Each structure stands twice: as structure tokens, then as C-alpha cells.
Amino acid sequence: MKKLFIKTYGCQMNVYDSDRMSDALAASGYEATTEINDADLVVLNTCHIREKAAEKVYSELGRLRILRQSQEAKGKKMMIGIAGCVAQAEGEEIMRRAPVVDLVFGPQSYHKLPELVGRAANEKVVETDFPAEDKFEHLPKARKETTIARGLTSFLTVQEGCDKFCSFCVVPYTRGAEVSRPVAQVVAEAQNLVDGGVKEITLLGQNVNAYHGLDEQGNSTGLAELIYRLADIKGLERLRYTTSHPRDMDDALIEAHRDLDMLMPYLHLPVQAGSDKILKAMNRQHTAKEYMELIERIRAARPDLALSGDFIVGFPGETEEDFEATLQLVKDVHYAAAYSFKYSTRPGTPGAEMDNQVPEEVKYERLQRLQELLNAQQKEFNQSCVGKTFPILFEKKGRDEGQIVGRSPYLQPVQVEADLSLIGTIQPVSIYDTGKFSLFGKIVT
Ligand code: 5AD
Ligand code: SF4
């Protein structure tokens, strides 16, 4: 067996993709390793969403060059491949900047990986086309023992690409136009995961609630309907989905949150900013008020639902007043968790061309203020869980001896003193304390 080492950067879709690459290469005799020194093939699955993400890849390549030299001195060959969104965006440029790389391939060519790796043994290979065929039809399914080894929760990509063209975002360029996988293909993959012991599936898509795959009769099917189809799979206990755009949150999906208990009451619904002027410049296609009204409708349907979001500070033209509108929106919503970033120009996006860029130190200062507020809200949310009882899906051994750890419906890790035999089961747990990252609870008997 040859050894494959994959390092994954960025979003959950990359985590999913890395597993698919691993499955594709298993067929040509590659076995995954967590030890880079043993690897015959090293793949960096990269992210291009923000500046630092791509720079991290180039500094990792500097380290890999040194590792490869020392491996060669021992007579061992090591091939280096770059996958993901940096590969898609930079293509040939990567070979120029880092000649140590043998193979550059974008997210739409993972099904061709065995062939590409074969070619890369003799020549430099760059593959960044968007091929006409459906890669998902050609990617092999995971073997049962591999699924079991990957654990009780799994990602499943149902939709890829984005047609929204927010003016800061590279995704429509690196991942291409919105494509939804057919319902039957998704159901079959979910069934395969459940057969391998998976109890919780998170459906993934850059804009997952725009899902519109075809069903067996050729009818366009929304995300809510797909969720109901998956809910019928015996042995599957929990469903989640991410990431959603406010504009695509339809009534059927809101009703699914009301009616379907296995759909977890936790929703990642990025708003990015609270000022209508900035939302317009970002091409978000909604106002702050429309977002707030949407949240009200979702909460009316499912009062215990918790929200998380993404925020960008310092988008071109953002004044102090605009930024304060973001703070106000956060105060009005009360987030359980959130991700916040300084705006970074992405070459090729409209935002990069805008001439009213915000100085770095202003972005920094605003990010500090926003994060202080978001952290306080997260703490408040965690504290509000104390005294409540939640179903916890136990996933593995806990931090300390005698503990096991699982996730709450809100994705919080919950540490409980209990027998290892409960791993893989869902138990009612009463929360008695919160730590920095976890909750602590006792099983209710
Ligand atoms: N600068 C900063 N943050 C960005 N994001 C996307 N593009 C940029 C950018 N150019 C953030 C958004 C998005 C999340 C995945 O990353 O908040 O929702
Ligand atoms: Fe990017 Fe906007 Fe599409 Fe999200 S909805 S992937 S932020 S373009």
C-alpha cells in the first residue's frame, strides 16, 4: 500500500472533499496516514476565502520542500499535490511560485484523481477545468470500515457552487455555478453512511438552502423535501445543514424546523453586516430589516432554535455608523455562536475594485469590538443552558479519565462522567456547568 497524507484547510466542504479524495485513491492502492513522513503523496486541500488562507499554503509548501529534500536524500519519493480553491484560483501560478508542486487540481476534478496522480509521476499536471460530467457519479462510495473509522457524525455535500455573487466572495469563481446533486444520489450516500454507523449527518453546500436537486420523477426538489426523504432512513438520528443564505430560507424549510424533531434547532444564517448601505454594496440582496423579520418567523416556528452567523467588518465604504448598525443587529438577534472576519480583498471580485477601502487598523479595531460582543453572547447562551436537559449524542472518550463527550443540539461539546459503552447512543443530559469550550452534564436516569 502507498501512503496518502491530506492536510485540510478552510470549510467543512473541504473536510468532506478530503474524505472523497481518500476514497478515490483507495482504489489505486493508497491508504490514508496521519504521519507526513511516511507519505508517498501529500495533498494540501486549500482554502481561498481570505488572504491568510492562501499564504498559509505557500508557507506550508516551503516546509514541504525541505521535507522532500531530506526524503530524497534517503532515497524516498514524495509527490506533492495542491487541491481546493487556491488550486482552482491560482492554477499554473502555483507551479511558478512553488516548483516543488507536482500536481494542481481543482474541486471539480477529484473523481479523476487516480489518473491525474498517474500522469504526475512523469510530468507536471494542472487540472482546473470545470468538466461537463458529474464528479459525484464517478466518485466511489466509502468502504464500510472507512466510514466506521471516521466516526458517528458525517458531512454530506448536496449542493456546490454559488450564483449569489456577493461582491466580497471568491466562491462563485472557485467553485463555479450552483449545482445540486440528484435526490436519489444523496439518499444512497446517506444510507451508505448510516450502514457504516453514522447517526448524524450535516448536509453541506456553499448555499445549501438553494438546493434544488431532481427527484426520481425528474421534479425539482427543495432542501426541506430532501430533509424529509433523509429523515426516513432507519438508524439516522440527527440532521443539520449549512451554510444558508437568508434569501433562500423558504417556508417549507422553516416548517421543517417546526415539525421535524431530528432536524437540529441550530441554524447558521450569515448576515455579514447590519447597515443597508453596506449590504447593498455587498450585493447581499436583502436589508437588515428583512433579515430580522426572517429570524422572527424562524423563531416563531421553533422557539428553542439557536442562531449562528458570519460577519465581515471593514468592507469598502464602511463608516463608524455603518459598523454600529452591525453591532445593533447583533444585539437584537442574540447569537449562540458566530464567526467574524476583517474584510480582505479577493482578486477578481467586485469588492477588490472598490476605491473606498477601509484602513487595516480601523478593521482591526472594529473586529475587536464586534468579537467582544459576540463572545459575550456566546457565553450568555452557554450559561442559559445550565439547568436544562438536552439529548446528547455521545461520540468519543472525554477529556479526562471516566468521561465521555458528545454534542448538544447546538453543537456544544458536553462532557459527562459515564461508561464508554454509551458512546454511539443519545442520552438525556442535565447541564450543571459551563467551561471555556464545553458544557458539563449528568445523565438523567
Ligand atoms: N473577506 C473577509 N471575509 C470573507 N468571507 C468571505 N469572503 C470574505 C472576504 N473577502 C467570510 C464571509 C463568509 C465566510 C465563509 O467567510 O463571512 O460567510
Ligand atoms: Fe459567497 Fe455570498 Fe455565495 Fe456565500 S452566498 S458563497 S458569501 S457569494
Image (cartoon, rainbow, N blue to C red):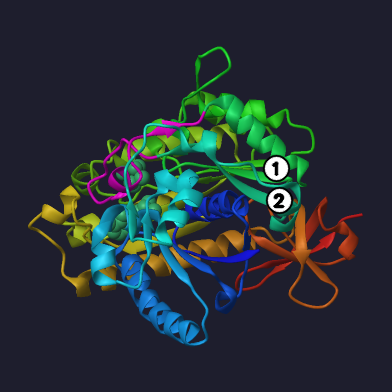
Residue kind at label 2, given as amino acid type: Thr
Please give left or right for residue 159 compared with residue 303 in the image.
left
**For numbered disc 1, what is the local secondary structure?**
helix
Where is residue 315 drawn, in percent x and y?
22, 57
**Please, is residue 433 above or below residue 315 in the view?**
below
Where is residue 297 drawn, in percent x and y?
49, 32
Q: Residue at x 69, y 54 (%)?
A: 408
Where is residue 295 drawn, in percent x and y?
46, 39
Residue kind at label 1, given as amino acid type: Leu
Q: Quadrant of the N terminus?
A: bottom right
Q: Crowding near pointer 2: few (<14 within 10 Å), some, many (20+)?
A: many
Nearer to me, 254 or 188: 188
Quadrant in which ligand 2 is drawn = top left
Residue 127 in view (yes/no):
yes
Q: Quadrant of the C terminus?
A: bottom right
Magenta segment includes 168? yes
Nearer to me, 5 or 165: 5
Magenta segment includes 389? no
**For numbered disc 2, what is the local secondary structure?**
helix
Cα separation between marks 1 and 2? 6 Å
Nearer to me, 32 or 53: 32
Q: Which residue is mark 1?
A: 193
Q: Place residue 98 in its image quadrant.
A: bottom left
Chief secondary structure of the magenta portion: loop
Q: Which residues are magenta?
A: 161-181
Q: Do tag 1 and tag 2 residues touch (Cβ < 8 Å)?
A: yes
Q: Residue at x 41, y 59 (%)?
A: 120
Residue 11 in view (yes/no):
no
Upstream in sequence: badge 1 or badge 2: 2
Q: Which residue is mark 2?
A: 147
